[in-house]
Image (cartoon, rainbow, N blue to C red):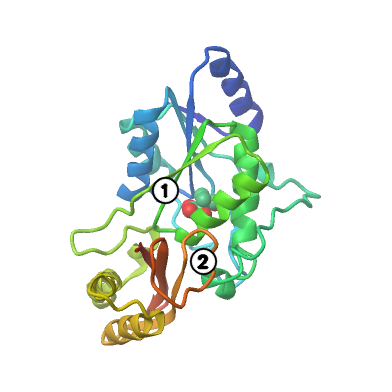
Amino acid sequence: MKILRSIFSVQKYIKQVRGKNKTIGFVPTMGALHQGHLKLVKEARRENAIVIVSIFVNPVQFGPSEDFKKYPRQIKQDSLLLDDEKVDVVFYPTVEMVYPRGYLTYVNVESVSEGLCGAYRPGHFKGVATVVAKLLNIIMPDAIYLGQKDGQQVAVLKRMVNDLNFPVKVKVVKTVREKDGLAMSSRNRYLNDEERQQAPVLWQALRSAQDMIRSGEYNSGKVVTAIMTHITEKSSAKVQYVCIVDKNTLEPLKECRKDAMIAVAVYFGSTRLIDNIII
Ligand code: PAF
């Protein structure tokens, strides 16, 4: 496995493998890898001749009061995990390389970036779309692999790929969960014991909502109230939002119908967790 730090070296590598007509699968990450990331890598490995993983903690997608500095960085451990998955290349650029002095160009996907997490994290999806657009331009993969856990990120990036005609397939991979249902996330490590014990309530509340809908309750208002009540039974949970939206446009839905996404963001102490379910 090669670890390449410069854009030039990645482009040189891509040029060589492209000449041999090999397909490239790409997994963008910010490192601190867990089984959720590794599932994306395994999918990419299964479907492509070459697998490239980027590790880049993207400053542009963090707000001024967010955890950019504190975000876990563990390149050695991550490299070992990726080597085990037979990844071909890890692209691990510096901030200066991605955003050199004088950098001025950003990608803003309107509307889908604005609700849900976007309402509480202004500029976040502009940062995500910008860095992913840059990575796609550098790597030019055949397919990009994204996790369903970040449901809004999936909608934003699918829209961007479509709107800007990136010649890449977007593959969305099911959320990987701990045994108790908690969605895997690099931020789970910030939870203290009590918060960790209570955090699976997110998935429990989403599953109960799904049962409620299956048994005929389609009214979004009632489903949202049931989820809120369920989650706030836990002493350390503070709900930021519970929304029922169309999974592609992210427009709010009055009725829970096919392709509805129920998305939640909840603080456990100072740790903000997100999860979702597609109906
Ligand atoms: O999901 C993430 O880890 C990041 O938002 C991504 C897609 C790697 C862009 O920085």
**Number of marks in picture:** 2
Image height check: is 136 above or below 88?
below
Task: Name the side, left or right, on which 28 lies relative to 230.
Answer: right
Q: Earlier in the sequence, mark 1 or mark 2?
A: 2
Task: Name the side, left or right, on which 209 lies relative to 122.
Answer: left
x, y percent for residue 196: 26, 71
10 Å crowding of disc 1: few (<14), some (14-19), many (20+): few
Q: Could you tell me which secondary element the residue under label 1 belongs to?
A: loop
Image quarter where the N terminus lies is top left
82, 20: nearer the viewer: 20
Residue marked by disc 1: 74
Q: Residue furthest left?
A: 179
Residue marked by disc 2: 67
x, y percent for residue 273: 39, 69
Q: Would you say residue 95 is visible in this rendering?
A: no
**Alpha-carbon span between mark 1 and mark 2:** 15 Å
Amino acid type for the residue under numbered disc 1: Gln
Image quarter where the C terminus lies is bottom left
**Going 38% across and 38% down the picture, which residue do you hit?**
41
Amino acid type for the residue under numbered disc 2: Asp
Image height check: is 201 above or below 111?
below
190, 41: nearer the viewer: 41
Among the 4 quarters of the image, the one containing residue 150: bottom left
Q: Would you say residue 236 is visible in this rendering?
A: yes
Q: Residue furthest right?
A: 102
